[in-house]
């Protein structure tokens, strides 16, 4: 997706403020920008770059060796190898087979410890910030797919599935935002070595929002209020763009903003 550089963003903030920042101002400006980035991220669960649609995720931990299995614990066979899983409780030596181990196994096979929830993190995939929908099979391909009810805990999303023990579910979620925008240690903002990028859809909002924060920090409260209003209008415009994308209508209710509510009603 499109991005802009932090150098460009910093230059725009500086231009809006009408000053050339001293070295002492660089860290404060970076903090303003990252504060606004967090606010933009939290404005909706449906930013395209963070939205993961119908991603297959396990209701199980990463595979462990058959020799490390614990009796009376549920597992899914991950790889069979030369392990006889039937000998330790499985109905068949088949990948994905759920069983309750009667003892540790032997050989080279592996199994995933069964969980009754979708964890926030899984190796090789983005970490979950917000669970949105969970389906039994891959949705948005077939006409009718069962959707699980679920509750969210500190461990992940616990699905309501009765006596079933599913290995995998198809999860639509908002990925975690972990970036910190701005140059690293040793590179002042605006330096040619600053290659940090920011989302293009946030660019104007971050600049005007940081400008408003700068004014407020300088004690210019009335001007800060006006700048804040302008920044919020920019953010609302981006949210309207999301609302008008067909993808959003498939996976969620419409995104309600002050702007589109006024237009509709």
Image (spheres, grey):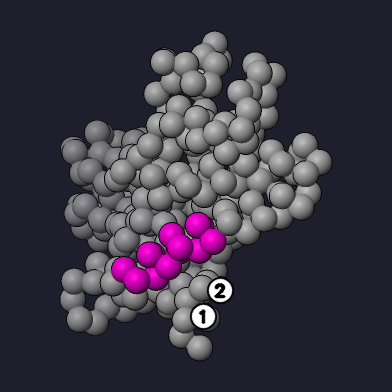
Q: Is residue 190 above or below residue 257?
A: above
Local secondary structure at mark 2:
helix
Q: Which residue position is annotated with label 2?
A: 258
Look at the image and say whether residue 52 sits in the magenta stretch.
Answer: no
C-beta proximity under 8 Å, tags 1 and 2? yes
Local secondary structure at mark 1:
helix
Residue lying farthest to the top in this orientation: 186
Disc tally is 2
Could you tell me if residue 134 is visible in this image?
no
Region of the chain picked out in magenta, as a range:
233-245
How far from the left and from the top, in percent, is residue 198? Answer: 43, 38
In the foreground, 169 or 75 = 169
Name the residue: 21% across, 52% down: 95
Look at the image and say whether residue 244 sits in the magenta stretch.
Answer: yes
Instruction: Give the number of the disc on residue 107.
Output: none
Residue lying farthest to the bottom in this orientation: 265
Name the residue: 34% across, 71% down: 244
Instruction: Using residue 189 as the reference point, say whether residue 121 is left or right of it.
Output: left
Instruction: Using residue 164 as the reference point, say whether residue 86 is left or right of it.
Output: left
Instruction: Using residue 71 as the reference point, say whether residue 110 is left or right of it.
Output: left
Please identify the quadrant where the N terminus is shown: top left
Residue 110 location, quadrant: top left
Q: Is residue 70 above or below residue 256?
A: above
Instruction: Using residue 215 as the reference point, say whether residue 134 is left or right of it.
Output: left
Name the residue: 25% across, 34% down: 107
Could you tell me if residue 17 is visible in this image?
yes
Q: Which residue position is annotated with label 1?
A: 261
């Amino acid at each position: 997706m499109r991005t802009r550089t932090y150098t460009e963003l910093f230059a725009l903030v500086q231009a809006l403020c009408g000053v050339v920042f001293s070295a002492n101002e660089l860290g404060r400006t970076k903090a303003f920008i990252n504060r606004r980035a967090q606010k933009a991220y939290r404005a909706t669960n449906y930013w395209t770059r963070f939205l993961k649609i119908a991603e297959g995720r396990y209701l199980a931990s990463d595979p462990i060796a058959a020799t490390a299995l614990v009796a009376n614990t549920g597992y899914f066979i991950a790889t069979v190898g030369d392990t006889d899983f039937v000998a330790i409780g499985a109905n068949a030596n088949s990948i994905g087979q759920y069983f309750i181990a009667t003892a540790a196994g032997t050989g080279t096979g592996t199994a995933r410890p069964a969980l009754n929830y979708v964890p926030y993190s899984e190796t090789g995939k983005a970490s979950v910030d917000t669970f949105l929908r969970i389906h039994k099979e891959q949705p948005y391909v077939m006409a009718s797919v069962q959707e699980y009810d679920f509750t969210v805990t500190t461990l992940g999303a616990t699905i309501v599935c009765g006596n079933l023990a599913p290995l995998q579910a198809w999860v639509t979620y908002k990925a975690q935002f972990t970036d910190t925008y701005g140059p690293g240690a040793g590179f002042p903002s605006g330096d040619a070595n600053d290659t940090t990028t920011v989302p293009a859809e946030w660019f104007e909002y971050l600049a005007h929002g940081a400008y408003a924060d700068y004014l407020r920090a300088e004690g210019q409260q009335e001007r800060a209020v006006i700048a804040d209003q302008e920044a919020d209008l920019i953010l609302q415009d981006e949210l309207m763009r999301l609302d008008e994308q067909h993808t959003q209508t498939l996976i969620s209710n419409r995104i309600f903003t002050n702007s589109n509510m006024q237009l509709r009603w």
